[in-house]
Image (cartoon, helix red, strand yellow):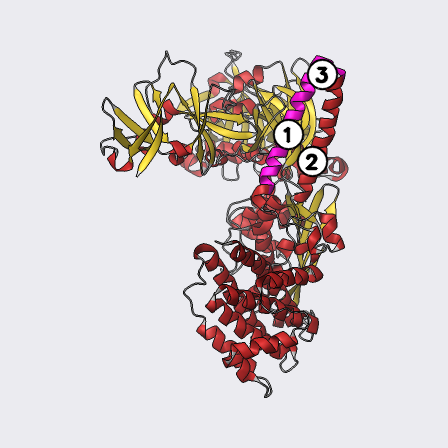
Amino acid sequence: MMTQYCTFELGPLLLGVEARHVQEVLRAQPVTPVPLAPDFVRGLMNLRGQIALVIDLRKRLDAQEDPCASRPINVLLHTKGGLVSIQTDRIGDVLTAESESIDSVPDTLQGRAREVLVGALRLPERLLLLLDPERIAVT
Amino acid sequence: MDEITEEFLLESREAVDQLDRDLVALEAAPGESEVISRIFRALHTIKGTCGFLGFGKLERVSHAGEGLLSRLRDGELRVNEDIASALLATVDAVREMLDSIQTNEKDGELEYGELVARLKQLAEGGPPGPPAATATAPRASKKRAKKRARDAEPPPPVAAQEEVATALETSAPALEPAVAPQAAAKGPSPSETVRIDVHLLDRLMDLAGELVLTRNQVREIQQAADNAALSTASQRLNLVTTGLQEGIMLMRMQPVEYLFGKFPRMVRDTAKQCGKQARVELSGNDAELDRTLLEAIKDPLTHLIRNAVDHGIETPEVRIRSGKPPEGVVTVRAVHQSGHVSIEISDDGAGIPLDRVRDKAVAKGLISQERANALTPLEAANLIFLPGLSTANAVTNVSGRGVGMDVVKTNVERLGGTVEVETKLGAGSSFRLKLPLTLAIIPALIVESSGERYAIPQVHLQELVLLDRAKQKLESVYDAPVFRLRDRLLPIVFLGECLGSTSRRDCLARPKSHLAVLQVNGLLFGLAVDRVIDQQEIVVKPLTALLQDIPLYSACTILGDGRVVLILDAAGIAQQAHLTTLQSGAYTMDAARDPQQGASGPVSSFLLISEANGPRLALPLEGVTRLETVPLSRIEQSGDTEVLQYQGEIIPLHRLGALLPPSRLSTSDTVAPQLDYANVVIVANGRGSVGIVVTDVVDVVDLTSIAQHPVNSAGVLGSMVVNDRVTDVLSIDWLLTRAGCADPELLRSA
């Protein structure tokens, strides 16, 4: 079965989510911090009357902080638990791929990244890591 | 699923709920032919429609039920308990099959053969008639039924649906969902009401909230622009928005009837289960609540009612012995009062044995014996809301596990409501819930802390106090800051500290802040915030699941400038700051009693002492045997301990500063004055004496009472205001324990 993926970059990583989950892509918006929330929660954001939970994807994936990262771009995702916005560095293309060609996450992958990654897609040049939107905003 | 099936499910469900109520009513008044006809019609309609849609099993079961009902209606049989139970079982079976149709469009795997047989048997149990028709020839029976049901139309689905609607409207106008309330009261004709999907309703509510926001923005622009045309348009927008918002709010209101309708059946079943006789009396069914709220109070109410039957109402034998009718009554009453709905659940049962509650609370270590003795009956009754307290002697499968009452309380408070209990031994108990009408839009106070804004629901707000350190200092009881509000000590919680954004030191260092005095279930405390910004109506939006576990927030909202703001949960903050209900209950209680106690309360004396680098403290004078000023040369060493020869005994000496927890002592490096003598307070705990070395003995004062303060600090009996300073009263027993000489016998013999 062919599936469409929205891709985006976070530092050296190329990440993707199934396109059907993506509602829209936004420039940085004002975010209200939520004290005492898990560290990967940036806060809450108003999206035309709906409230989205803003996730710091770097922290969520335990990726290294990038001091020269520009203003983040929000990718708004529909999840069962409501709107979730993940902050990324750059937006990439929309790719179409056979879902059979997805490899599972290597067993050696440990820690937080394992919680949210569902698989990897072999592109000619590099690997596209696929996120499960439903697992991003849960602990 | 096709539209007809969906419609069928919706209407059948309503019919089934109504059947529950009618059947219980019928059992109570077996002769009511009106009720029997109604039940018959409802079941007949279900049967007819499902036959048309091809749900064979459902048809068979409802047909068997209908057969029995037709005998009842014709007066050939009378309703008894067996028949009522069988009919209720039929209703349950129908409900199960409806659920099954909902999920997989089939009427389920179960055959219900036994039920059908039982129904037939019951139908045949009457005088000779035409039972064969009901048992074997559905077609014939259908025809008979058609003839008998005066206004019941035969099965074609469209007609049948109308019939249900008519039946429902005549019997219970309030059953139409999502209807403008005034229309419901008048008993509308079908053409005046519309069914609306609740999701659509929620969406409309969201949009209305968004419109309010947009309106606020336009208003700001208009104020800046000073344009007449824009101003007129903005005013109109304002009017329309308010009207629309109110209308949508009303649409979301539903009569409590929805919830109450389930109670007769529940009380009946619970009573049967516990071998009791009970019925429910409902009143105020037309009081209305927001549908989300209605949904949310379902579980607490269910719990309270089951409890009333299981714990409250006695067995028939006991009731007869105490001169009551064998059948207990649970009364559920809803009253609409200015902006609130209060729901009262009372039973005429045994009441709550307060002694047992008290003993249990003490036995479980939830309160101290002294506190328990001092409780008023009302306070003792409210102990049942403490976690881990159940007074049921035996655990039944209905209740008695000790979870529940505290959950009831937590749930109700989460909704911005309160719950209270009143009880009289032998006469019954009564639980009173006070609930807001809606959760969707609430008045709130907007405050600022560490540069972020937060909303505090007005329900909890008692007053606002400006805290100007130049004029009034904050004092502390141990390390718990308190504020002197008129004649009472108010525990202070710093919002910044609670949120982890500001340290206690920085909070204390602020020259000015505001205290929002909050009350949650009898617990009064001051929430210190940096600034109070505004007071406004906010649209409550639920928090995403990930954030719901944080006790400090109940929800969030969007303010006029489009920013998201968190709504604080006063109960959660109190919990986070370790203020517990009971201790604080004691606190408010003592404070309230103070005025009367001035004249009559017992007078006790206290010894005021102070430490060089610590606060001023007091000891109950009754525990102090003697005060001695001892030259330093008389203090000798024995092992690691300093000792003093005193009246022919060797008594151990302890420095007060070393006994107090380090947090008690100020960090300032005030040097203790160098003296050539020591002030020793000799205390005894009945078995021996210990000397406490203090820097200074200030005074002895007589006071009528000490205020219990709500923060749990070890060793502090309470605190009082002496010469305008907050002074902690230390427990001598605690000091002795601290000194490691709980048993001075040992020390002496050593």
Q: Mark 3 points at which residue?
A: B223
**On screen, residue A74 above or below A116:** above
Q: Looking at the rendering, which quadrant does residue B487 occupy? A: top right
Q: Mark 1 points at which residue?
A: B211
Q: Mark 2 lies on which chain?
A: B
Residue type marked 1: Leu
Q: Between A3 and B458, which is closer to the camera in this rendering?
A: A3
Image position, residue B61 (x, y; %) = 50, 71
Q: Which chain carries label 1?
A: B
Q: Between A120 and B669, which is closer to the camera in this rendering?
A: A120
Q: Which residue is drawn at 55% across and 49% down?
A: B361
Image position, residue B329 (x, y; %) = 67, 64
Main SS of the magenta part reads helix
Task: Tell me the element at label 3.
Answer: helix
Q: Between B230 and A119, which is closer to the camera in this rendering?
A: B230
- Mark-to-mark CA distance, 3 and 2: 23 Å
Q: Name the residue under label 2.
A: B244
Checking the image for residue B19, the label placed there is none
**Is there any visible trace of residue B231 in the rendered image?**
yes
**On screen, residue B304 above or below A75:** below
Q: Looking at the rendering, which quadrant does residue B114 occupy? A: bottom left
User: Residues in magenta?
Assistant: B201-228
**Badge 3: few (under 14), some or many (20 or more) residues near its Cα, within 10 Å?**
few
Q: Which chain carries label 3?
A: B
